[in-house]
Image (cartoon, rainbow, N blue to C red):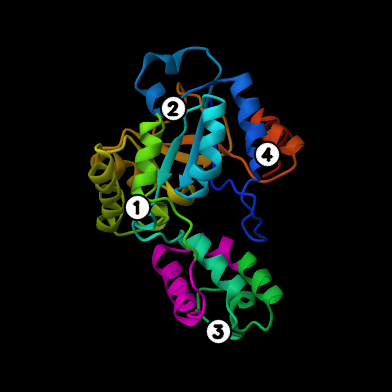
Amino acid sequence: MIKNFLFHRVNPKRDPLWDPMNVALFEKCIRYISKTHEVVLIEDLVASDKIHSKNKYATIMFDDGYKDNIAYAAPILETYKCKASFYVVSDCIDNNTPTWTHVLEHLFQFTNKVEINIDFGFLPAELKIDQLKSKEERIAYVSKLKPFLKKLSHGDRNKVLDKITQTYTDVELPQLMMNWKDLNELKNAGHYIGSHSVTHAMLGTMSDEKEIKNELELSGNKIKEHLGYFPQTISYPVGSFNEATKRLAKDAGYKIGLAVKQKVYDPSKTDIFEIPRIELYNEPWWKTRLRITNTLENVKSLIGYK
């Protein structure tokens, strides 16, 4: 049994929509995990016979490729002698732009524009708008819009995103991502760099296999160009995948596919292209510890909570 712990951002700055994990909480997580588990790279574990042993393994993983990973998380990992895997969005690294999920929230938080016409037929009535008069209204709206967008097809989602980016042109996007030099530094320190696609597209919602293939192959080739190897691992953006995604990932040359699923990984029962991860958030320590021990998910399962 292997616990794969997923992080995104680690930062002392707060965000009302997508709050990074506080640095002190991250250190507490790594200290606790490293004391209670043997911390390894999933890439090393899968490549060895250890994966079938009874050792208490944990892996530490980061999605997206944010600069705060190397600024705040990496020094803590070094302190506790832990290696981690970082799965990066190649376009975000190339252009120093955040993922679409981050851009979406940033635009609504910082625009000064009031009028915006979002009236697509596939949206429910409460998400069809022509204006948002205050920052509070915009934050409340995007908090409802974002989870709904994740349910849409790739094409419909992009229609909404394009409309928003074409409207909120008064907002400068933050430069928050690592660059290839940073990733080389992490690689040289013993960490692993894998793929999180080209554009952070939700692969399981895409119908055009050529587009999916490009997301998988081009991101892997970009890593090969800058770091010297085609990655073993694809981390599915937003945890979105289906059978076609897995097949195309294998065809592209990947050996491992990472989902989310909030549960422990049992190699004897779980497809290696559906490896689950336990995502950790900026929450009180007692709740984070329940996630680390998997107690929270066990309780939810017992009471039938979803």
Q: Which residue is mark 2?
A: 41
Q: What secondary structure predominates along the stretch shown in magenta?
A: helix
Q: Nearer the viewer, residue 139 or 299?
A: 139
Which residue shows up at 46% across the image and 71% down it? Answer: 161
Which residue shows up at 52% across the image and 12% down it? Answer: 54
Q: Which residue is mark 3?
A: 116
Q: Is residue 262 magenta?
A: no
Mark 2 and mark 4: span between their CA atoms? 22 Å
Q: Nearer the N terminus, badge 2 or badge 1?
A: 2
Q: Which residue is mark 1?
A: 90
Disc 3 + disc 1, Cβ < 8 Å: no
Q: Nearer the viewer, residue 147 or 75?
A: 75
Q: Is residue 166 magenta?
A: yes
Q: Which residue is mark 4?
A: 25
Mark 3 and mark 2: span between their CA atoms? 45 Å
Say what secondary structure mark 4 lies in: helix
